């Protein structure tokens, strides 16, 4: 099941980092995708183009977060997601249920990755812009399995 968190304004880097930390702690969240305006290169000095830290890993925040797309296990997870959003998005937000993240490989994937398509893990499908280099646009953080 996919949901979309649609904040009523763009998120700062700090708000994005804090929201992601809380969302990551929720049991039942499979994948999270950030969408928004691409930020200028780091050399430009834009205040939101910075490194954020999640699970001890540094991630270069490359977008001004406008939407957060999530794949979750069940509808029961939505209550916890809503609470996390209420803590960080005091200016308001909407949550929509729908299909937002592709689950299957497409012809476009075949054109982009060619013979290496079979080497792409299933959890990577639907996470990146087909026109961008994969290494520049996706960072996978593994959940700790106890």
Image (cartoon, grey):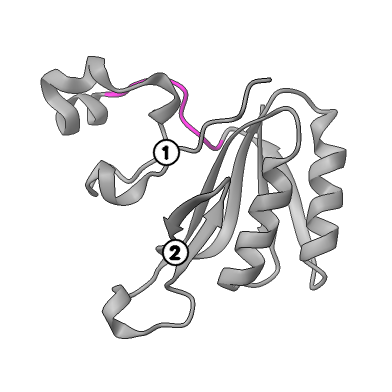
Q: Overall secondary structure of the magenta stretch?
A: loop
Identify the residue at image location x=36%, y=42%: 128
In the rendered structure, find residue 21 and report the number of the disc placed on it.
none
Q: Which residues are magenta?
A: 100-106
In the rendered structure, find residue 63 and report the number of the disc placed on it.
2
Q: Residues within 10 Å of mark 2 (few under 14, many from 20)?
A: many
Q: Reply above or below: 6 against 121.
A: below
Q: Residues within 10 Å of mark 1 (few under 14, many from 20)?
A: many
In the visual, does 49 lie left or right of 66?
left
Indicate whether residue 44 is drawn in magenta: no
Most foreground residue, 129 or 86? 86
What is the secondary structure assignment of the residue under circle 2?
A: strand
Q: Reply above or below: 146 against 36.
A: above
In the visual, does 62 lie left or right of 17?
left
Q: Reply above or below: 47 against 146.
A: below
Provide residue 45's location: percent of width, then percent of height: 36, 85
In the visual, does 133 lie left or right of 67?
left
In the displayed image of the protein, which residue is found farthest to the left? 115
In the visual, does 66 lie left or right of 76?
left
Identify the residue at image location x=22%, y=46%: 133
Identify the residue at image location x=24%, y=49%: 132
CA–CA distance in space, label 2 to label 1: 14 Å
Identify the residue at image location x=67%, y=42%: 24
Quadrant where the C terminus lies? top right
Provide residue 110's location: percent of width, then percent of height: 20, 24
Residue 7 visible to an observer of this rendering: yes
Give the residue number, with chain letter if any, for mark 1: 127
Provide residue 117's location: percent of width, then percent of height: 22, 20
């Amino acid at each position: 099941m996919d949901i979309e968190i649609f904040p009523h304004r763009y998120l700062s880097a700090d708000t994005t980092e804090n929201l992601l930390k809380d969302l990551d702690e929720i049991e039942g969240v499979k994948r999270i995708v950030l969408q928004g305006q691409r930020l200028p290169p780091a050399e430009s000095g834009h205040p939101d183009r910075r490194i954020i830290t999640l699970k001890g890993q540094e991630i270069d925040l490359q977008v001004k977060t406008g939407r957060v797309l999530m794949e979750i296990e069940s509808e029961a997870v939505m209550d916890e997601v809503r609470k996390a959003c209420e803590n960080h998005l005091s200016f308001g937000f909407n949550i929509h249920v729908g299909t937002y993240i592709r689950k299957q490989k497409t012809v476009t994937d075949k054109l982009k990755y060619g013979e290496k398509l079979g080497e792409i893990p299933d959890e990577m499908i639907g996470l990146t812009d087909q026109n961008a280099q994969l290494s520049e646009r996706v960072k996978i953080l593994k959940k700790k399995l106890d």
